[in-house]
Image: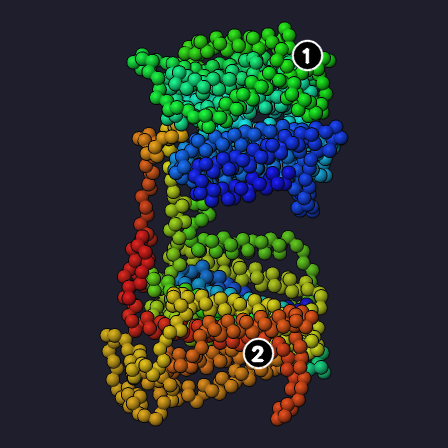
Amino acid sequence: MSVNLTLLLMMGVLYAVGIYLILERSMTRVLLGLMLLANATNLLLLATGGYAGLAPIFNKDIPATEYNDPLPQAFILTSIVISFAVTAFMLSLIYRSWLLSRADQIQDDREDRRVASQDLFDAEEDSEIAIETSDFHEPVQSKDERLVPLKRTARRKPEQEPKP
Amino acid sequence: MLIVLCAHFIVAIFAPILFTRLGRAAFYVLAAVPAASFVWLLAQYGNVYSPTGMNPSLDIRWIPTLELNLTFVLDELSWLMSLLVLGIGALVLAYCARYFKTDDAGLGGFGAQLLAFAGVMFGLVTADNLILLFVFWELTTVLSYLLIGYARTRIAARRAALQALIVTTFGGLAMLVGLIMVGESAGTYSISEVLAKAPELVAAAGKPGTVVDVGIFLILIGAVAKSALLPFHFWLPGAMAAPTPVSAYLHAAAMVKAGIYLVARLAPGFSGTDYWQLTIMILGLSTMLLGAWRALLQHDLKLILAYGTVSQLGFIMVIVGLGSREAALAGIAMVLAHGLFKATLFLVVGIIDHQSGTRDIRQLSGVFRSAPKLGVVALIGAASMAGLPPLAGFVAKESVFTAFVANANYGPAGTLLGTVVLAGMVLGSILTFAYSARFFWGGFGRKPDASGLLTPTPFKRVDWLFLGAPALLAALTVAYGMFPWIVETWITPYSAQFSQYSQEGMHLVLWHGFTVPLALSAAVVAAGLGLFFLRERVEALQRKIPGVLDFERLYRQLVVALDRVAIWVTGRTQRGSLFFYLAVILATAIASIGAVLLATEQEWTGQRYFLDGGSPFQMVAGAVIVVGAIAAARANKRFMAVLMVSVTGYGVALIFALQGAPDLALTQMLVETIVLVAFVLAMRSLPARLPARTPGNHKVVRIILGVTFGGAMVMAAIVSMGSRIAEPVSLALPALAYSGGGGLNVVNVTLVDIRAWDTFGEISVLAIAATGVASLIFVRGRGQSLARAETVATGSVGRIDGAAVPAGPAVELAKRFAVTPGNPWLVAGRTLAPEQRSIIIEVVARLVFHSIIVLSIYLLLAGHNGTGGGFAGGLVAGLALTIRYLAGGRFELAEATRISAGTLLGLGLALAAVTGMIPLLFGGEVFQSTIFSFDLPLFGHVKFVSSTLFDIGVYLVVVGLVIDVLRSLGSEIDQHQEDGIGAITLIEDDEPLEVVR
């Protein structure tokens, strides 16, 4: 099968720029990157249809090879409308995020950082506890039984967001 | 059999209800289940021991392809184990009714678990399928976890439960691998068939033989972990955090015997495999000695018993695993004897704890005098444990010595090894005698306290109901000792599977005559007494010898190391940075594409070209796209970047048009337009400038990733398309579309007919996304409560507080325009503040709206044969509504769309779904099209295809989506701006997020 390099080069540029944009912190740029990636993918699908041809409106006098391939076209049509829906959803996300935090930024997940920097000591796993010699103790914690307090690492200050 | 099994689980399910009704007396109801089962079991004696050899069995096909069937067989070994499981289960449950208080928390769940445990154990010992056995095996693990952790509020209980769970599950996993290895080599998972095939399996030379050897070794690991042998023994003393009845049942009579049972079950076939004797002899003997040694150091009565159990389990494992007829008889005799006396003793400890509030032997004193009946019961149990006549323990231990003397004399391992094992057992028995004496003396003896006084510990009276269970067990211990031949007849069918070592054979009797075993027993008693009387010196000596190997500490260190690795890995991989994740994913994608490209030699037949003769202007569009994309990446202003992305979008639409895809071009143009409007609406309150770029030198990484990814995609496309040689499947589509789908537009027929499932999925996604948009902006509801325009004051909408109202002729004109009667170009145009209005747009909107709607309907209906379709039509209608909104504000939109977007989405989906289903009624397939041809006056010949209805569904969904977007990103954000939801306090770290209105 023949390969249309022009289409593929366009696709390559759109992919490159799209990737460049989704690696940004700004949510708007990420969304724009996603739109470019969608366009790039549509071009890829289009390229699989081969040479430009007639619009696939059936006419029994025209052989099937004369049309541009209708199957990728159907895929692309689906893709265009879904991209629209996703874009609208992302726009609402951006607005909501702006409303709540005044930031158009993808922030690092602080909880993930906290997990990574947590203490090895776990109160339930690792503290020493007294041996009990009866099932019938009152459920009052004796002095020995009290947990060794958890050594807390100083909580990090939240990263400063650049003020818009 | 099935009834017995199911009764346990069904009653267990309803146990919590029983407990709320009856309080702790419900334990008696629960105990009735295993008790009745026990009676059934006794009634089965005739069947199990019938000379015809047909055992009661049950076989339900479950997953035959996996050879996983609910197969149960009650043979002699199962029957004996079931005696213990059901009998002691019933007694322990009855005992619980006095042990617990009615108001103890979680008693219902506890009772249910304990009863279910009895059922599971019964299943375990009767299962005749390796995988089924494993299922029950793990069920006992899970239930034991819950039962040990009964005192949820105590950290010791939770920790012990988890430790037992982890250790036994580890063994269970090894066992599962072993079971599968054995099952696969045997070609069957039925235990009886595997055992029947065992001789040839074991004898098989080379690989199959080795697989079986290793598989059996892995199964032994499971058994060893479950039965708390070295090096897994530590979980059992830890599990003493469980309530004492649980310890009596799980950790003496039932669960820990599962490992013994498995060894006993497999011994007839596999005791000759390579690792069997070595594993069992070494681990069993060392466990016996270590457990007994530790038991002598304990002060908690329960821990003495726990370490004693560890020791005894090692002991029994050695006997059962030996594989001679004498040892098999002695082993099972010991299992029964041990079950009886250890359960007795645990229940006695429970009573002591319950009546005096402690189990510490340094605090207990004079209990025998306070509770002589309890003392007698305990004495019987302890004496049986020590191996004194005329009790069960003595008979069993005598037979063990006989079996191992025979082993030393005639066994295959030789005299030396046999004697070493025998010596180890005698030493273990001496220690056993000593800790048995320590137990009885510690629990019941009179001891001077710190001031030298013999003050008896306060002890409440024990009622007979409480004492009943241990007393009955003690009576059975005596009966067993007096009539051992009954027990022997029970065991003989099992032990007959093994070859006999000595000529004269062996029997379970109280009096053997003056033999070597009797001498050994006498020596054990003498040395044990010596150890007991010298207990203080022995203990001091013991404390001087440091613990050589502390497996519990090793386990803890292992867990800590695991924690450390987990935190390290989490810290390295879960950075919380989207950039990092994406970079890793993309780099992986690039590397895998690159590796495939490099590793495979491609040979393609197609040609490559830059210029497509059919579409020379493609180059121009391409240039526009490239410029637009690069400008979008470089733009610093928000709307500039958005516009540049739109430019690429329109460029792509142009390419579609040039390529011969008018439907795509049309749809893409419409979508680009609506998206542009949506962008402007959503982003109007965000700052004009995009935030500063990501700091640091990520930029280089991003460029490299972007360029290499783009390059990789280009190369992958060139290679894969170039090497394609088959004709496109779509060559058949045009003719199919006409004949089957009844339409000329192949793309549209593909969407609504050939690939209608796909489209149906897609419109579902649209409905979900639309709902998502509305939810994110409105948070509550879908915003259908907007008032009618007539209730809104003229010129009130769109005034922004504090903003200077611009003056000038245009505004003046707009004000006049608004109050002039008789020219309502738009229904709600007057509601807008004058400075927000544009007369030209209002007039134009008025003029074009209906035309556009008509156009959209035309596109919808014509789409089947020409350019258009539900998507394009819906988008055009959405565009018309967008114009109304832009011209007349949110009340105009509300007037234009009195129907809820949700209703439209639902209607559209329902229409599409119903259209898809209707052909089923006429024997067709889902989404099959029907063509109706008929003549109408005026219209002439009409050809109607049922898939048009589906397309109308698509149309409705798209319109619903656009309305949701306009209402959310348009109307609601208007409202926010007028309400001044710009003033948001910056949110502190831990406070809940709240919008200040």
**In the displayed structure, does residue A162 sit left or right of residue B1?**
left
Quadrant of residue B800 in the image?
bottom left
State the image coordinates of residue B996 (x, y, percent, origin top left): 28, 64
Q: Nearer the viewer, residue B254 or B52?
A: B52
Q: Of the numbered discs in the image, which one, if any, rests on residue B409? A: 1
Q: Of the numbered discs in the image, which one, if any, rests on residue B481? A: none
Quadrant of residue B618 in the image?
bottom right
The residue at 64%/21% (across/down) is: B487
Of all chains, the one bearing label 2 is B
Q: Residues within 10 Å of mark 2 (few under 14, many from 20)?
A: many
Q: Of the numbered discs in the image, which one, if any, rests on residue B869? A: 2
Q: Residues within 10 Å of mark 1 (few under 14, many from 20)?
A: some
Quadrant of residue B456 in the image?
top left
State the image coordinates of residue B431 (x, y, percent, origin top left): 51, 15
State the image coordinates of residue B879 (x, y, percent, origin top left): 46, 79
State the image coordinates of residue B786 (x, y, percent, origin top left): 37, 75
Would you place residue B818 above or below residue B311 in this image? below
Q: Does residue B865 appear in the picture of this structure?
A: yes
- Give the amino acid at mark 1: Asn
- Give the amino acid at mark 2: Gly
Secondary structure under the numbered disc 2 in the rendered image: loop
Quick one: quadrant of the C terminus of chain B? bottom left
**In the displayed structure, does residue B913 sit left or right of residue B558?**
right
Q: Work out which residue is located at the far front of the displayed protein and give it.
A: B464
- Nearer mark to the viewer, of 1 and 2: 1
Of all chains, the one bearing label 1 is B
The residue at 72%/20% (across/down) is: B499
**In the displayed structure, does residue B116 sit left or right of residue B541?**
right
Colour convention:
rainbow
The residue at 68%/15% (across/down) is: B506
Is mark 1 in CB contact (under 8 Å) with mark 2? no
Q: CA distance from mark 1 to mark 2?
A: 95 Å
